[in-house]
Image (cartoon, rainbow, N blue to C red):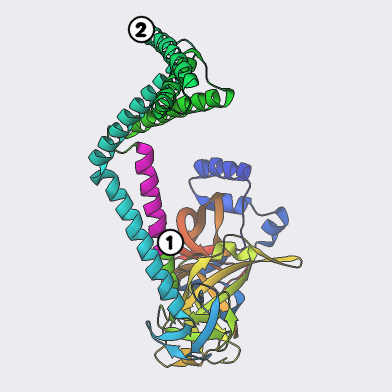
Amino acid sequence: MLKRIWNWKLLAGFALILGLSGGGLAYYRSTLTGAQAREEPQLQTAVVRRGDLILYASGTGTLVAPDPIELGFGSAGTVAKIYVEIGDLVQAGDILAEQADQDELQAAVEAARLEVLNAQQALDDLYANAELVAAQAYLDLANAREALKDAETGWWVQQPGHRASDATMDAAKAELELAEEDLSRAKAALDKDPENPSLQLRYANAQKRYDTAVRNWNWYTGSPSEIEQMKLDAELALAGAQVAAAERYWEQVKDGPSEAETARAKLELRNAQAQLEVAERKLEEAVITAPVDGTILAVEAKEDDEVTGPFIALADLSKRYVEVFLDETDIDKIDVGCEVEVTFEALPDKVFTGQIVRVEPSLQSAGQFSTIVALARLDQDQSGALDRLLIGMSAAVDVIGGRAEGVPLIPVEALREIEPGQYAVFVMEDAQPRLRMIEIGLMDITFAEVRSGLEVGEVVTTGIVEVQ
């Protein structure tokens, strides 16, 4: 872009001279060199005219499929049927392919549903059976305490000195002495008449009485064997542990389900529901349907193949897109919404129009060059030419960075930049150049759009360069 930027000191001088002389002509002439003044060159001018100004950047492009949709089964499996081929036009909901072994997937769904029912029932039971569970826990605690008491009593009475009361001990001792005397008398009588049946019976009864008395006395005065004591200790410890467990459980259930139990039951229910969703999705995705209207771009499997991922590609080609490549120096001429004009090499006589819909946030490097990458959507064409376009076609692309139609235009040589972004021109008034501030819009290397400050037909100076 051609600019004539004057030194600020020169502008200050201009202001001083202008103030002294009351006109711009003296200043304008003061800028001429001595040689120029002696030659008295003719002042070059241009007329403000109405016209069009278009800013554009030229680049290349390729017709691409807009975000192809890749489709596959929900899980790895065997392809049972494929109903489409590359290039087929499909509508949303059309069946494209089916997976084998759908009966197994259906069975998995039913099993998952049963797990959900069981988990829900378990959660419901926590609340529905809370009173019953608490009552049973309290009864179990009472029984455990009673069993502990029995075990403690059994252990205590088996210890030496605790097997009988003093009265029982005295009675046992007396019984032993009487039984011993009775046995002695019965033996003496039998010794005199060994064949006497009545004496034999008497002696047998006396012996039995004596044996019983001895056993009772020995038990009352004895102690458990080592094995018996170990058993007593174990029974007592077990009864104590059972009481402790019953108390803990009672504390857990006496006020209803605990937070931990409730959280665990809810977690199991959520897990079961998630597994059901997965199983249902796998069954649903065992049949591939077209999510949108479009064209089949790829089919990368055949029937009876084992597949583990997407194998069908689909895109909506009713809207055509061009990937655009521009030099990075044209960054000021492209943005989302900019118009484009596209000419494909295969259709050189047809110009397609469209708009930029996306500009990539980073440059694309190719060797020593960096390019801007953007995506343009082509406008619908009533002639049907879009239908003749094939993915991958190369094109020349003009991106319209700005457009001003039917506006006042002046040559850029007429502009004087007073400050960055502020411009003035010398306007011929009464055959004399006078400085005037103006507002400009679009500007290329040749012309600038005038938004205010000049009217069509006015004459501005362009220096010593003649401009038509």
Tell me the quarter of the image containing the N terminus: bottom right
Q: Position of residue 448 (x, y in %)?
A: 51, 65
Q: Residue 251, can we see it?
A: yes
The spot of residue 246 in percent (x, y) is 37, 31
The residue that appears at 58% across and 45% down in the rendered structure is 11
Q: Nearer the viewer, residue 4 or 305?
A: 305
Instruction: Check disc 1 and report the residue beneath it.
Output: 275
Instruction: Kindly identify which numbered label has been placed on residue 382.
Output: none
| Residue 210 coordinates in the image, percent (x, y) | 45, 19
Q: Is residue 47 magenta?
A: no
Residue 154 position (above or below residue 89):
above
Which residue shows up at 57% across the image and 49% down it?
Answer: 27
SS at badge 2: helix
Q: Disc 2 designates what residue? A: 167
Assess whether residue 273 is covered by the magenta stretch: yes
Task: Report, in whole angstroms, how far the alpha carbon at label 1 lies from the one at label 2.
Answer: 74 Å
Residue under the point 45% across and 85% down:
96
The type of residue carrying mark 1 is Gln
Task: Residue type at mark 2: give it.
Answer: Ala
Residue interval drawn in magenta: 259-276
Residue 454 in view here: no
Q: Residues within 10 Å of mark 1 (few under 14, many from 20)?
A: some
Label 2 CA crowd tier, 10 Å (few <14, some 14–19, many 20+): few
Considering depth in this image, is 167 or 384 the residue closer to the camera? 167
